[in-house]
Image (cartoon, rainbow, N blue to C red):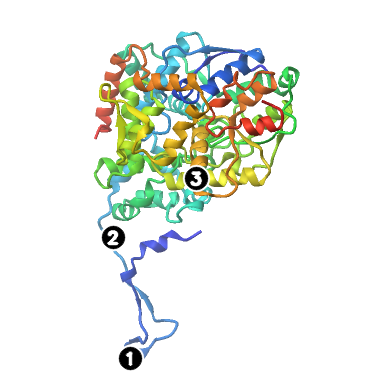
Amino acid sequence: MAIHERSLVEPERILRKERLVVDGVDISGDWNLIILPRVINDYDLDFAKEIVNSPDGKTINQCYQCSYCTASCPVHNYWDERYNPRHFIYLARLGMIDELQKRADVMWRCVSCHKCTHRCPKGVLVEEVLKVILRTMAKKGLIDEYPSKKFDKFFTESVVEYGRIEDGELLFGWIEKQGYKVFKDPILKKPIPFIGETPEWLKQLTMKPLKSMNIDFLILNAKHMLFHPRTKNWSKFKQVLRKVMQEEGALH
Amino acid sequence: MGVIGKRVAYYPGCSLEGAARAYDVSTRITAKELGLELDYLEDYNCCGAMESKNVTFMGTMLLNARNMSLARKQGHSVIVAPCNGCSFSLQRAEYFLETDRAVFERVNALLREGGVDPLDQIPQTYHILEWFYHEAGPQKVKEKTKKPLKGLKVANYYGCLYTRPHFYARTYAHAGGQEEGVRPRRRDTADDDEHPYYMNALLEAAGATSVEFEPMHTQCCGGPHSLSDEMVSEKFVMMILQTAKRNGADIIATECPLCHASLEMYRHRLMMKGVPDVDVPAAYFTQLLGLAFGYSASDVKLKDNLSDPIPVLKRLGLA
């Protein structure tokens, strides 16, 4: 496991010279590496305060940096070593926003497997805390749109609108957002799975129940795609949900 | 045994009404055979899964509190969910409602505003596997088995959120750093946290053989990023399938519709790419139990499984 604090030393601060003479003394050889000091004065302590004040992020201050979370993390171990939950918590508590921003391309990759939270010896809800860090950064406009946020919003919109989700709508809606041209029927504007420019694997998968003549399965799912399953007496509750989300600033 | 209750509120979740219909049908069959009663939660809403909680905290609490309120209205203090995502969401809400008084009061006020009865008591949520194990158990499964799953080598895949995190799933007693009052206790009925075995025990009682599957039995399948982060999900699913195949499994038994869908989807894509050792089909553990109880392949809707486990089961004379 890499020591990630090393990454806080920017490459231009490391000076390595062939011949180095200081005050007339030749110190080439073992002593020819100099790291210029880095003074950080643009840290933002309000950032950590905002995280502590949210109900799911208040355990962040219990962290004592043991790195059990990182050692457990499948994204760190099997995908990208730069994904390091302990380091993200460290940076968030110091308020080093610019360093967090440099890691924006991996920070969203958490798959919510909760190994970190489960194994934390200090009772930090690590997964929740990381999501709160991301959420707070997104709210302050410090981070660009990332794929999982787009999907989360797309999903939540569907839940708030209908009370229930529908697999077909979610799948084809997401495929469409990826830039594929999904064929829709002209009247109800609902996607038709078998034709159109959907990816090959999806086409083959949707053909499977047709090939095995699984008729009642097809009818059930077609019905759900045409008439979205809804929760009854939802409208009043929907308004409350929208109001709460407005207060949290979650609608942007 | 018999600590959870034979009659409980059943929260199927959105998936089980559509693409994962097979899980719903086979769950009902299994419950009936084991002498247990599921009371369908009328007019429920989505739990918000792993996605909504990243967008809005209070909104997700409300979604789950509404379902809890419906269960209380039907006279239940126990909810059973067959989906890892649903049981996680409900247990997460349970944790925050129990430990944070301010959240509890705010939620109750907002429920009233939304025209739903406020919570008088917070119902407990169990995963359906835990319920089957404790209310029926391997002994009962053995008694009911008419057609043992002889020769079937099963890789039992539990997924992440069945035992994790211990704050919500209550699988582990230690929670350092938290105050004494809000420290969650281990539930007596909970499965082992790092080495879950309830599914192994039930399927072995039905005559199947479990293959060695650690540590992939609780490895993530990509979960909420199945669609939004395809590269990572593909790699995780590849690791799961290859471990199962190389350990000699005929079939992977699942207990979560999201894991199941992710495994089937990426299995197909990996096979298209020509990746070796990924052709193990997946089936819900209730489907396998249903077969053992003497039901036919069409009764447990084996055709719904896109990974097509029928040839494997036919070869062993089970379907």
Residue B48: horizontal and vertical position, in percent?
40, 27
Disc 1 crowd rating (10 Å Cα; few below 14, some 14-19, many 20+) is few
Q: What's the residue type where badge 3 is placed? A: Met
Residue depth check, mark 3 versus mark 2: number of the one nearer the observer = 3
Residue drawn at x 39%, y 28% as measured from the top left: A168
Q: What residue type is labelled 2?
A: Ile
Q: Do the residues labelled 1 and 2 touch (CB within 8 Å)?
A: no
Above or below, B250 against A104 in this view is: above
Residue A28, image quadrant: bottom left
**Which mark lies nearer to you, 1 or 3?**
3
Q: Give a yes or no on whether discs 1 and 2 share a subunit.
A: yes
Mark 1, residue position: A24
Q: Identify the secondary structure beneath mark 2.
A: loop
Secondary structure under badge 3? helix
Note whether residue B77 is visible.
yes
Question: Could you tell me residue A99's position as x and y percent?
Answer: 32, 56
In the picture, the quarter occupied by the C terminus of chain B is top right
Q: How far apart are marks 1 and 3 (CA)?
A: 68 Å
Kindly identify the residue that appears in the image at 26 percent across and 47 percent down. A142
Quadrant location, the N terminus of chain B: top right
The residue that mark 3 highlights is: B272
- Which quadrant of the view contains residue B247? top right
Q: What label does residue B309 carry, if any?
A: none
Residue A40 disc label: 2
Q: Residues within 10 Å of mark 3 (few under 14, many from 20)?
A: few
Q: Where is residue A59 shown, x and y percent of the image?
A: 42, 39
The chain to which mark 3 is attached is: B
Report the amino acid beneath label 1. Answer: Gly
**Residue at 58% of width from left, 42% of height from top?**
B279
Quarter where residue B293 is shown: top right
